[in-house]
Amino acid sequence: MSDFLHTLPEFIGNHPWLSLLFVILLAAIIVGEIMRMMRKYKELNPAQVTLLVNREDALVVDISPYADFEKGHVPGARHVAMSQFDPENKDLAKAKDLPIVLVCKSGQTAGQAAQRLVKAGFTRVHTLRGGMYSWRQANMPMATGKR
């Protein structure tokens, strides 16, 4: 360990750009993790989503494009296009105290929708980590068609 500490200043002096890149990447990872820990919704894996649906009757909302929804979705999920996703919708407002799981194709869009729900006062908001890709990869049951 002491050899490493003695050669570190020499390495940094010989490779300033590489050292700078390391510091930038390390800072980006730390900031990303802090932001992930501070957000007010949780990411769940497919097994956790199944438990939440079975034990607490969670509402699953799929915000994928309709064509993707018809090809395969979580059984019992309701489809709402992201362009029509409104946290103030009267049907969604009725579920304010229920756990809500947002699902999309890859998990990115669901995170944006989750932030909108949290801003609207929903307290039990979750997303499916990895979206329908992770659901398929876990060999979970899927429904096709409109329902």
Image (tube, grey):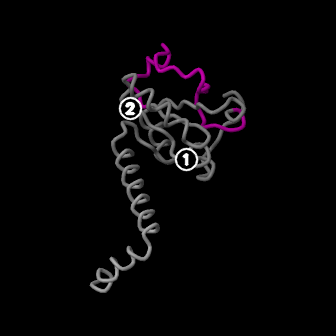
Q: Residues within 10 Å of mark 2 (few under 14, many from 20)?
A: some
Image coordinates for residue 137, horizontal then vertical, percent: 61, 53
Answer above or below: position of 84 versus 36: above
| Image side of residue 104 versus residue 18, left or right | right
Camera-nearest residue between 27 and 34: 27
User: What residue is at 41 percent from the left and 68 percent from the top?
Assistant: 19
| Apparent side of residue 3 relative to residue 22 in the rendered image (left or right) | left
Select label 2 or label 1 by which is in front.
1
- Pointer 1: what residue? 130
On the image, the x and y values in percent for residue 8 come to 34, 78
Element under disc 2: loop
Q: Main secondary structure of the magenta part?
A: loop
Would residue 92 be found to the left or right of residue 144 on screen?
left
Q: Please name the residue shown 33% across and 77% down the image.
A: 9
Mark 2 and mark 1 in contact? Answer it, CB < 8 Å.
Answer: no
Q: Callout 1: helix, strand or loop?
A: loop
Residue 43, numbered label:
none
Q: Quadrant of the N terminus?
A: bottom left
Mark 2 belongs to which amino acid?
Arg
Quarter placement of the C terminus: top right
Position of residue 19 relative to residue 29, above or below, is: below
Give the Cα distance between marks 2 and 1: 19 Å
Q: Where is residue 89? Give x, y as percent.
A: 50, 15
Looking at the picture, how far across and down is residue 37, in whole percent? 35, 46
Is residue 51 rendered magenta in the image? no
On the image, numbered disc 2 is attached to which residue? 124
Farthest residue, direction top: 90
Quick one: 137 or 41, which is closer to the camera? 41
Q: Amino acid at mark 1?
A: Gly
- The residue range painted magenta reads 70-99
Was residue 97 drawn as part of the magenta stretch in this picture? yes
Q: Residue at (40%, 37%) from the top-left corner? A: 41
